[in-house]
Image: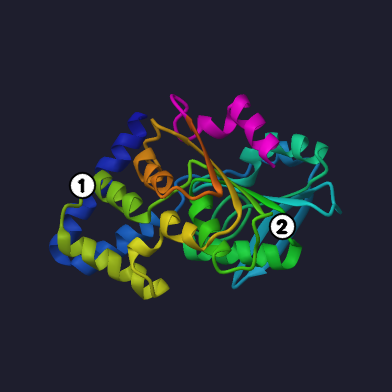
Amino acid sequence: MKLSQRLAIGYIQTKFKLLRLLSKRKTAEQAFRLFSTPYLRSKNKAQLQHAEPLNFTLDDLTISGYRWNHPQPKKILILHGFGSAAHKFADYVRPLTEKGYEVLAFDAPAHGNSSGKTTNAVEYSKMIKKVIADFGPITGFIAHSFGGISLSLALEEMEHDPGTKIVFIAPATETTTAVNTAFKMLKLKDEKVRNEFDDIIFEISGKRTEWFSIRRAMHNIKASVLWVHDEDDEITPWADAAKVKEDNHPHINFVLTKGLGHQKIYRDDAIKNIVIEFL
């Protein structure tokens, strides 16, 4: 971790330490806003220079996206993770179009060239449903990290069949784990603040934090799934994904790696080949 990052985290930790003495609710609200704010906005367009630009309105947001090889009967939608952007997956475009796919990729709200300052899985899943409605039907999906939980929430509410293909790459399996990790980083050990945080999630979504779970959603998803995960992933722990594996869903195939972590895994050539072959 860079010195500037350590200093920033230290400042935030001190801020929350003081704030929680004044108001548990305000502390939870600030923590939720931080939890929902991408730490990096990447707008690099170099990898997307041959793409057809797309955009649409989602509530009061402008969502930017890209399309290749249109029109084709089979379509793939690529969904990036938190703090990432569509262009990060540009290396998947050529092999997919060579297989005859039309490829779509959109920057999530508050990411890349899309507008907004904060987002959450409910909003991202709403965006996914809008993309499917406006540009679908979608034959298959590639979803990394935060894109994975958002896709699972969208797909369990939509008509699909076993012919639909999903590639989960290091998906954010359990939101409870993500919140636990955030609170640990912020050194927030106050149970009342955590309860207020969970209440905010419920007020926004009508669901408790633990409901935002790929493991739970998989019981409502019929698609064929390739699940790629690294056992050393410190962002979306394999321990959460392992419980999905233990559920023994017949429509999920797991590929477990070691040493690739959370980011290198989707850039790894061997993994890319496995993904393309599955699709």
Residue 78 at what x, y percent from top left? 65, 48
Give whichever of 176, 22 is nearer the camera.
176
Outermost right residue = 71
Please report the residue visible at 72 percent of the width from the left and 60 percent of the height from the top. Answer: 55
Please report the residue visible at 46 percent of the width from the left and 50 percent of the height from the top. Answer: 38
Please report the residue visible at 49 percent of the width from the left and 50 percent of the height from the top. Answer: 249
- Is residue 119 in sight in this rendering? no
Which residue is under mark 1? 187
- Is residue 276 in sight in this rendering? yes
Identify which amino acid the numbered label 1 is placed on: Lys
How crowded pointer 1 is (Cα within 10 Å; few <14, some 14-19, many 20+) is rated as some
Give whichever of 199, 177 is nearer the camera.
177
Q: Nearer the viewer, mark 2 or mark 1?
A: 2
Q: Is residue 265 left or right of residue 100?
A: left
Q: Is residue 27 left or right of residue 266?
A: left
264 within the magenta span: yes
* Quadrant placement of the N terminus: top left
Residue 218 at what x, y percent from top left? 48, 57
Identify which amino acid the numbered label 2 is placed on: Ile
223 within the magenta span: no
Q: Which residues are magenta?
A: 257-279
How crowded pointer 2 is (Cα within 10 Å; few <14, some 14-19, many 20+) is rated as many
From mark 2 to mark 1, how far is it between C-alphas?
A: 42 Å
Answer with the quarter of the image where residue 63 lies: bottom right
Residue 133 at what x, y percent from top left? 70, 68
Q: SS for tag 1?
A: loop
Q: Is residue 53 left or right of residue 231?
A: right
